[in-house]
Amino acid sequence: MSAPSVTSPKSPQGLRRVVGASVVGTIAEYYDFFIYGTASALVFNKIFFPEVDAAVGTLAAFSTYAVGFFARPLGGLVWGHVGDRIGRKKALVFTLLLTGLGTFAVGLMPTYDQIGVWAAVILVLVRLVQGFGVGGEQGGAVLLTAEAAPPARRGFYASFVQLGSPAAYLIPTALFAVLTGTLSEAQFLAWGWRVPFLLSALVVVVGLYIRLKVDESETFEAARETRKAETAPLKLLVRDSRKEMLGGLLTKFAEAAVFPFYTVFLVSYANAQGVDTAMVLNAVIIAIAAELVMIPLLGRLTDRVGRRPVYLTAAVLNLALIVPAFEAVRSGSMFLITALLVAGLAFGHAGTYAPQASYFPELFPSVSRYTGVSVVWQFGSMIASGPFTVVAAALLIAGDGSYLWVALYVAALVAVSVVTLLFMPETAPGRRAGQEYAHWPAAGTGSDAAAGADAGAGTDKGAESLWTPERTAG
């Protein structure tokens, strides 16, 4: 049988404070991370790899972008352990500081003309620090909100945390659009590109101030005695939640692949096709603004119809939009490009992204939840997002500019998620007669919660398997 829905939600005021802090903190952290992707597409090939062919320089710049994704799983494991054992809040404060300092350092870096190849080496090292910090961010941010929200509206409240990533992309994209539109190319290459990186200091200070004022998760506190007696969170996951980890990781592919496809690669593809990149960036801004509206609406929808139906429908939509997105860019039409990006980001990406904030936490018991969510999030991102721009750029070169191989690559990643979702369980309490899929201890009931966690730490696998109809029924 499933563990009862026993979480004790915070007061409305306390819940709003947690949601606000999670959103602002995530914006600060992902601003630091995504600003690098935009700079990779627009400028890094010219200032860090100027001695090679333009296409190869872009490939090299995207390679340094990918490095950050490969550091994220290690960060997820380390900060997931800290979050499960020491506290969600403490882990989030450290990850914000690490990522922010790394981004600010990029704004001060010397270029290839000043120190040669060492500029690229330093860039890679800074990117590793950024990735290590971001690796622990999303898991903790969604947990603080999901564990504070009433179960019946968990999808809605937790989805607000997902606003942080597109908003964080929107801010540097808008900054770069303004800078490229007002500065000459010489000015932009000399100093203009540094401005968004240096402004990260202000973003981090604001995010840190707000995050320090948030209380620790009550669900985390309720399981304190269990945590002391239990083995390491990762060992618990390997022992009890292997199928949830693998299934969650594979469902992550669709969302993790399409975001860099729409927001980073298509900008580079437009440049290769001779299409005005400023126009594409403006279309991205419009599409992400629409996504910010849709994310909480889709999060609320997951409370009513379930996490899985929303996720699956959006993943299929992403499959259908791949080729039209390329054709829209090739057309050079602002209307078509904007329409396809709005469909892809506000519905395709948002429909996979919004459910994750509640779906992934609901797969794992409280004593190992931070680690479980971080493993799913960061390993899924490393595989699907990490090498994406590099592989896509290489496939474009190999195909002499044809997008066929890139389209097949994106389609394969999304298809993995579509197939996996067909076998995944539904976790929304509203679709499970009020029952939780995994154990969520009641706040303020330490010994009871500890006993309950011992019984539910394995997400009731003694009674049912993850893949049986009883577990997957919505």
Image: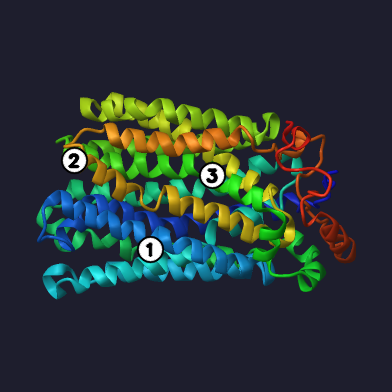
Screen quadrant of the N terminus? top right
Left or right of residue 376: residue 392: left
Task: Find residue 250 and name its label.
Answer: 3
> In the rendered image of this protein, does residue 437 appear above or below residue 135?
above
Residue found at x 70% / y 52%: 364
Q: Which label sits in the foreground, 3 or 2?
A: 3
Q: Which label sits in the foreground, 1 or 2?
A: 2
Residue 270 in view: yes
Q: In this figure, which residue is indicated by the disc labeled 1?
A: 200
Q: Amino acid at mark 1?
A: Ser
Q: In this figure, which residue is indicated by the disc labeled 2?
A: 271
Tell me residue 303's x, y (percent). 69, 35
Residue found at x 61% / y 37%: 299
Q: Sequence-wise, which precedes: disc 3 or disc 1? A: 1
Q: Quadrant of residue 410?
A: top left
Q: Which label sits in the foreground, 3 or 1?
A: 3
Q: Sequence-wise, which precedes: disc 3 or disc 2? A: 3
Task: Assign a secondary structure to mark 3.
Answer: helix
Residue in front for this viewpoint, 456 or 146: 456
Instruction: Sort mark 1 into few (<14), some (14-19) or many (20+) by Cα contacts within 10 Å.
Output: many
> In the rendered image of this protein, does residue 362 appear above or below residue 331?
below
Q: Amino acid at mark 3?
A: Leu
Residue in front for this viewpoint, 417 or 362: 417
Instruction: Kindly report the distance in space between the C-alpha atoms of the residues bearing marks 3 and 1.
Output: 32 Å
Instruction: Sort mark 2 into few (<14), some (14-19) or many (20+) by Cα contacts within 10 Å.
Output: some
Instruction: Kindly report the distance in space between the C-alpha atoms of the residues bearing marks 3 and 2.
Output: 32 Å
